[in-house]
Amino acid sequence: MHDITVVDLSRLQFAVTVLYHFLFVPLTLGLSFLLAAMETVYVVTGKAIYREMAQFWGKLFMINFALGVATGLTMEFQFGTNWSFYSSFVGDIFGAPLAIEGLMAFFMESTFVGLMVFGWQRLSRGQHLAVTWLVALGSNLSALWILIANSFMQDPHGAFFNPTTMRMELDSFTQLVFNADAQSKFVHTSIAGYVTAAIFVAGISAYYMLKRRHLDLARRSFRMAALFGVLATMGVITLGDALGFVAAQAQPAKLAAMEGLWQTEAAPMPFNLIAFPDQHAQDNRGVLQVPYLLSLLVTHSIHGSMPGFDTLQTEAIGRIEAGIPAVQALQALSKDRHDAAALARFNAHREDLGYGFLVQRYAPDVGKATPRQIRQAARDSIPPVAAVFWSFRLMVALGLAMLAFFVLAVLYTLRNRVQERRWFLKLAVWMLPVPFLANEMGWLVAELGRQPWTVYHVLPTWMSASTHGVAYMVFSLAGFVLLYTLFIVIEMVLMVRAIREGPPAPGAGAAYAAATPVAAAPSGYLED
């Protein structure tokens, strides 16, 4: 039996490392495409200022990219060290997209990053532009395969549990890749990265305009960021709605937690604008509701409805009772793999195996599980509602605030009035942490809302962890927190130093820009 303290510490350690790492990822995703857009304008127009923009923002991109790689490498090792049962149980499926991410996306991205940084005087304009676009493509391919792996945990498709090998096995790579959760989450996450980069560029450009430094670069960068950002923010809000619609079908408990829905209500359902969920009492305190809105948001119809936790717990009790024979049959098969009666019994209840595992936490001999233990396991099927509820609302509120900011930014910059609005430039600087906070809230909604499952409806979190001691977990957790905090400090110091130094003097790259032909030249030749 797993020590629940060890499981909780393992979860906390992984959460800490992911939350740190996810500070770097969105900026990498978005800034790579902004760099490609800036360099495209340079190649098309030949204006040296856009080359200077691409080089300056590329310098900040490289700082973020390097720290993102450093914080990301350790996460994959945790699957083997802290989540060994999980790795054994689903390694055949989970390992495939991670391997592809490493071989195709990560190596592709890293290779072309080197060419992008050191190739300005070795490649033609067209060649260097192609390299920059490949960096952007590689960054987003990396995110795609990571999210495919994560989406298998959220809504498992393309695999089945083999009672002979006692593990999940891949039977449809196509279903794994084209999982609806994976596709919608990839687009939502990538566009959230574009919003992050747009705020980043706009905020630093606003800082330069406030200081009256590098004004030409700052104004042009701000305009590109504003246009990029307003489109991306509208996209991320729209696709967030689509992701919620997918969650309603695949993870109704997560959606119920996002909405604080303890009791199933008849349509049209009100939206809990403000509430303070009480997990123990299974009720909300201090509720402020908007009539009809939840039905419209979730089902896109005033007549639509969704189940509350009262309905979901009743369903969970039924599935636990059906899953108990599956666990018993699996135990019989572990002793005799040729037991035909046990195999037939397992196949009859295999869809509820995960719920049988859920009650095994309280009744190691599931055949002796009492009604009280079954109800307790059913209560465990409810995610931590308050954390999910408020993380979701904060994410949405920050998204709407960014949309309002970008609408004003576009209006001011297209009228060439942004430099006169010093209050707005100060606001732009203060907006810098907003997308990072919104991204973190989105991750909390996705991952906390999946609990108590590591693989939804298949493998409970309590049985997924390795059997370490508490002292080991405390020591490793403290070590990771200190190391990752150091990475954040390094990132901030390097970023602030680069921003204070600013871009090179205007025209520094003009001679190269005039001498470099647009047509492709043989790679490896100096063109100066």
Image (cartoon, helix red, strand yellow):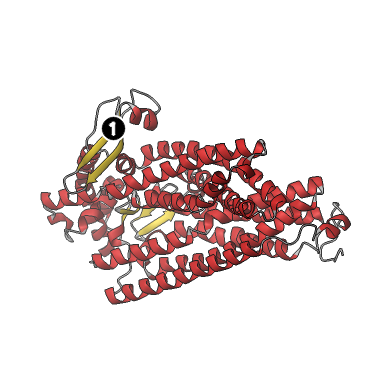
- Residue 526, image x, y percentages: 85, 66
Secondary structure under badge 1? strand
In this rendering, does residue 297 appear at all? yes
Q: Amino acid at mark 1?
A: Gln
Give how far across and how far down residue 115 sits, in percent: 72, 63
Q: Residue 370: percent from the left, percent from the top?
A: 11, 52
User: What residue is at 42 percent from the left and 55 percent from the top?
Assistant: 169
Residue in front for this viewpoint, 459 or 72: 72
Q: Tell me which corner region of the image, top left, top right, bottom left or bottom right, holds residue 484.
A: bottom left
Question: Residue at 50% of width from left, 55% of height from top?
Answer: 146
Of residues 509 and 161, which is closer to you in this image? 509
Q: Residue at x 80, y 45 (%)?
A: 45
Q: Nearer the viewer, residue 502 or 394?
A: 502
| Badge 1 density bin: few <14, some 14–19, many ≥20, Cα 10 Å | some
Q: Quadrant of residue 419?
A: top right
Tell me the quadrant of the picture where the N terminus can be found.
bottom left
Residue 62 at least partly seen: no
Quadrant of residue 328 within the rendered picture: bottom left
Of residue 97 and residue 159, the one placed in the foreground of this image is 97
Q: Is residue 487 above or below residue 352?
A: below
Q: Which quadrant of the figure contains the C terminus? A: bottom right
Expressed as whole percent of the image width and height from the top left, the position of residue 139 reads: 60, 55
Q: Residue at x 48, y 48 (%)?
A: 176
Question: In the current view of this chain or complex, which residue is farthest to the top?
Answer: 303
Determine which residue is flagged by label 1: 289
| Depicted 6 relative to depicted 415: above or below | below
Q: How many marks?
A: 1
